[in-house]
């Protein structure tokens, strides 16, 4: 199989380039991460992030034939149905080396939404209880693994990564806005009520299309908009 | 929170709401005007003139014109703040963006005043 991989080593290369390499997959429909492992054996300088190899850690988010996803759970038949695999780093973020990107902008937005429970009331002796119905509201939100596939597929995040929170951050923001145990709803909404943080989302749903966990950030953003609208009227 | 001096309503929520309301007004206006033309294939200049002499049509047309201006302002602001930014182009981006935003505002206001003159000058 022919693999075209994005290469850039800031210490030796003046600019990035695509390197074509033939890989023997043994005719099997292996995962893209397995292809990367074979490539790494052939050329140890090829760099990428990986850890759990089962779609849980979110380390190996890459762009495969134009679509973001996790290399470890994307089979070749899905990533490269035409037979040629093109691997690039996640778009929009600065490249550190080969497929490794600098995630700082992504994490800065994540930090901005205060992704932790805020509750001013005195803590109970054991734990803060939640009804099964309230707990159910967090389904489809808490499963995010912060792989950045969604935010780096979003043009609004490409152009304004310093101002637009991005789909991943907003999914997390709603995860805490929807949590019955959180008491900071008013301040959380006040922090999001500006022309960029939430409203840069134009609902093109690239995030939904690429999320490897099948989550729906656009829906969560819609819920935040409704909360902001209710708060203002 | 990110603030922005050149956005239409200074608030994301306000801009978002204005954009949706103005889109509905524009859709209603264009459906109505297209329907009117469709159902009056032999329309004369006199009939067209008479139509725009009625106050409800003038008010509806002015509402559509204001909606177009507001919609265009918000839309252009979004496009300009995407592509002409300090992050991408340094201080040139900011200068260019402010100049184009002012240009958009002047064009929008001119069309509005001109539109009023046309509508009430018939």
Image: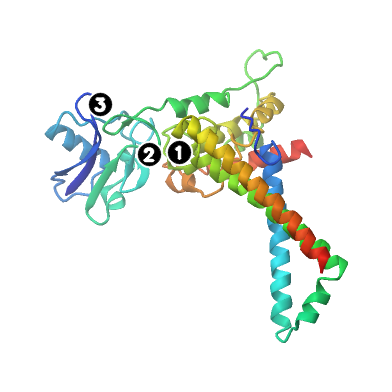
Q: Are discs 3 and 2 both within one chain?
A: yes
Residue linked to disc 3: A10
Residue linked to disc 2: A91
Q: Name the chain under label 3.
A: A
**Where is residue A77 shown, x and y percent of the image?**
27, 52
Report the residue at 37% width, 42% height from top: A69
Q: Do callouts 1 and 3 mark residues in contact (Cβ within 8 Å)? A: no
- Residue with the most extreme right position: B55
Residue A73: image quadrant is top left
Q: Do callouts 1 and 2 mark residues in contact (Cβ within 8 Å)? A: yes
Q: Name the chain under label 2.
A: A
Q: Is residue B49 above or below residue B108?
A: below
**Where is residue B77 shown, x and y percent of the image?**
60, 43
Residue linked to disc 1: A158
Precedes in sequence: disc 1 or disc 3: 3
Distance CA(mark 1)–CA(mark 3) = 22 Å
Report the residue at 19% width, 49% height from top: A28
**Where is residue A164 shown, x and y percent of the image?**
54, 34
């Amino acid at each position: 199989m022919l693999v075209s991989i994005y290469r850039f080593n800031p210490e030796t290369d003046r600019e990035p380039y695509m390197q074509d390499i033939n890989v023997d997959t043994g005719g099997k429909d292996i995962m893209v991460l397995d292809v990367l492992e074979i490539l790494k054996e052939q050329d140890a300088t090829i760099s990428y992030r990986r850890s759990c190899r089962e779609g849980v850690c979110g380390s190996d988010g890459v762009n495969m034939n134009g679509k973001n996803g996790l290399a470890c759970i994307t089979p070749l038949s899905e990533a490269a149905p035409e037979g040629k695999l093109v691997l690039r780093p996640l778009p929009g973020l600065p490249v550190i080396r080969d497929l490794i990107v600098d995630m700082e902008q992504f994490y800065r937005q994540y930090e901005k939404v205060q992704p932790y429970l805020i509750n001013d009331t005195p803590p109970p002796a054991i734990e803060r209880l939640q009804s099964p119905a309230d707990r159910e509201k967090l389904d489809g939100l808490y499963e995010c693994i912060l792989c950045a596939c969604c935010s780096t597929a979003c043009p609004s995040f490409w152009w304004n990564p310093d101002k637009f929170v991005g789909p991943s951050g907003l999914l997390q923001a709603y995860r805490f806005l929807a949590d019955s145990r959180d008491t900071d709803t008013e301040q959380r909404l006040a922090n999001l009520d500006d022309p960029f943080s939430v409203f840069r989302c134009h609902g093109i749903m690239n995030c939904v299309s690429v999320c490897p966990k099948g989550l729906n950030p656009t829906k969560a953003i819609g819920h935040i908009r409704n909360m902001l609208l209710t708060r203002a009227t | 929170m990110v603030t922005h001096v050149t956005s239409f309503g200074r608030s994301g929520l306000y801009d978002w709401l204005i954009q949706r309301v103005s889109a509905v007004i524009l859709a209603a206006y264009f459906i109505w005007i297209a329907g009117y033309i469709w159902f009056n294939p032999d329309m004369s200049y006199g009939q067209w003139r008479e139509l725009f002499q009625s106050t409800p049509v003038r008010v509806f047309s002015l509402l559509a014109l204001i909606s177009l201006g507001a919609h265009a302002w918000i839309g252009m602001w979004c496009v300009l703040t995407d592509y002409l930014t300090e992050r991408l182009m340094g201080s040139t981006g900011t200068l260019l963006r402010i100049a184009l935003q002012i240009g958009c505002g002047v064009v929008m206001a001119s069309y509005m005043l001109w539109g009023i003159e046309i509508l009430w000058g018939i």
